Image: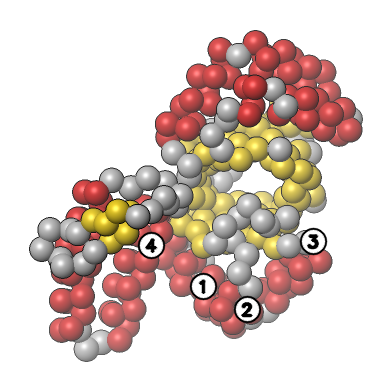
Amino acid sequence: STWFTPKGSGVRIPQRPLLIPIPRWVFYILNKYFKECFCKLKKIKNLKNMKKILLIITLFTSSLTFSQYCAFFDFETQEPESVVSTLKGMMETDWAKNIEGTKSLFAYQFNGTNKATHSVQFCFPTELAFDNFMTSWYGSVQAQVFGEKMNKYAKPVGQALNTPAWFKNDWTPDQVFMIWQMEVTNPALYVKEFAEFSQGFAKKMGFDNSYGVGYPISGKIDSFSHFVWVGAPDIKTALSRTKQMYSDPLFSKYSSKVKDIRKVVNTHMMVRVMDF
């Protein structure tokens, strides 16, 4: 591995492959930012203020390192077997094999009044990867042929390009997700409060599945501005954890803090059917 030393820091940082390539100037800014923060921390006697600064640093570095984009293509179908067969054929094409991201099919369970039964989702690590996907979709004969075939079995319900505002842990191993869609009037404060609550609850319960706050960068509808997800290995675990969360004192405290800035408008369960 090669090494990089930010100017004036005296710290050697290994340049190894990350989830997303980070340019050198980012390390320089972070190094300078952390130095200033920790100098201020030495002067702070109030523990609550210290916790707030550390939380801000955590939120900043998390959003920088893990920024991703997930395209949701929601649809309604009465023939899920035909949909799966068609998607398998599509994902075996050269076009799909060159997609720079994950490809998954999910089923919506107990989705309220939403007519969507399933969702095909593509998640990309960078803006460029998503741009390449969109360009290739319109330029690929293979993609268009399978797209037309899908329309025979599936009725499109909605599309959205979502991105996380903040999250913890890798969501790709999770098989089930509990989703809360909500209207948030103060996103920065809400993310801060959710991050503090969710990390405390996860530590208390001892689970390491993914959880976070996301929002539609494009494709937003009137009913909600943000959504929260909590991942689990199976339906049983997802339900038991949700019941435990609702009855936990940490949740009551968190709810009282955010009651004036967020309104839950829908909840549903999303189950991973298969990855391609």
- Name the kind of residue labelled 2 in the image: Gly
**Residue pointed to by mark 2:** 206
Say whether marks 3 and 1 touch (CB < 8 Å).
no
Residue drawn at x 83%, y 23% as measured from the top left: 153
- Name the kind of residue labelled 4 in the image: Leu
Comes first in the chain, label 3 or label 4 = 4
Residues at marks 3 and 1, CA–CA distance in whole angstroms: 21 Å
**Residue 261 vs residue 32, the one in the foreground:** 32
**Residue 114 vs residue 94, the one in the foreground:** 94
Q: Residue furthest left?
A: 8
Counting the numbered discs, the total is 4
**Residue pointed to by mark 1:** 199
- Name the kind of residue labelled 3 in the image: Ile
Residue drawn at x 81%, y 66% as measured from the top left: 236
Crowding at dot 2, Cα within 10 Å, few <14 / some 14-19 / many 20+, comes out as few
Residues at marks 3 and 4, CA–CA distance in whole angstroms: 29 Å
Badge 4 element: helix
Residues at marks 4 and 2, CA–CA distance in whole angstroms: 21 Å
Comes first in the chain, label 2 or label 3 = 2
**Residue pointed to by mark 4:** 59
**Residue pointed to by mark 3:** 235
Q: Residue furthest bottom?
A: 45
Comes first in the chain, label 3 or label 1 = 1
Image-based side of 65 in relation to 203, left or right: left
Q: Residue 86, image x and y in percent?
A: 80, 25
Badge 2 element: loop
